[in-house]
Amino acid sequence: MSMKEEAIRTLVEGSDVPAPFVPGESPVPVSGKVVGAREKTLMIEAALDGWLTAGRFSEQFEREFATRTSRQKAFLVNSGSSAKSARRGRALLAPPEGTPPQAR
């Protein structure tokens, strides 16, 4: 394990141990988010890469999302408005040739 990996592990270790839930006192996140050790490790890695916008993780997500949805390409956007604007370039987002209409 590299020094970088060891340092990240030290930072993350034990940080995802939840406090006991106390009804009426403990906060309940409305998003239902779960940020565990793996997610924290990836956040630290992204920050250490110096990529605080699109970088290797977003590129990996786009590739895997396109593959899982049988698309030639996928684009990560920051909002519904950006997605709507990207949709105007529909030729880039078109499904692969031969995709049945019900799957579009």
Image (cartoon, rainbow, N blue to C red):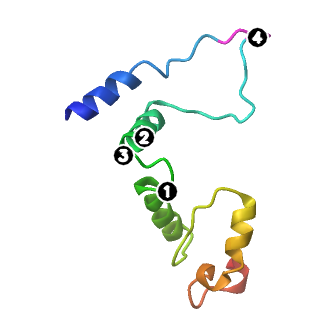
Nearer to us of marks 4 and 2 is 2
| Residue contact at pointers 4 and 2, CB within 8 angstroms | no
Q: Disc 4 marks which amino acid?
A: Pro
The segment highlighted magenta reads 21-25
Direction from residue 29 to residue 65 in the image, left or right: left
Residue at point 29%, 27% (across, down) = 7
Relative to the observer, which residue lies in front, 93 or 68? 93
Q: Which mark is residue 23?
A: 4
> For the residue carrying disc 2, how many other residues have a C-alpha within 10 Å: few (<14), some (14-19), or many (20+)?
few
Reading the image, the residue beneath label 2 is 47
Residue 76 in percent (x, y) is at 57, 62
Q: Which mark is residue 10?
A: none
| Residue contact at pointers 4 and 1, CB within 8 angstroms | no
Q: Disc 3 marks which amino acid?
A: Asp
Q: How many marks?
A: 4
Relative to the observer, which residue lies in front, 77 or 36? 77
Direction from residue 8 to residue 61 in the image, left or right: right
**Which badge, 4 or 2, is on the more N-terminal residue?**
4
Quarter occupied by residue 46 = top left
Reading the image, the residue beneath label 1 is 54
Q: Give the Cα separation between the discs numbered 4 and 1.
A: 40 Å
Magenta-span inclusion, residue 56:
no
Q: Disc 2 marks which amino acid?
A: Ala
Reading the image, the residue beneath label 3 is 49
Q: Disc 1 marks which amino acid?
A: Ala
Relative to the observer, which residue lies in front, 91 or 103? 91
Residue 23 in percent (x, y) is at 76, 10
Residue 104, above or below 7: below
Residue 43, above or below 67: above
Nearer to us of marks 4 and 3 is 3
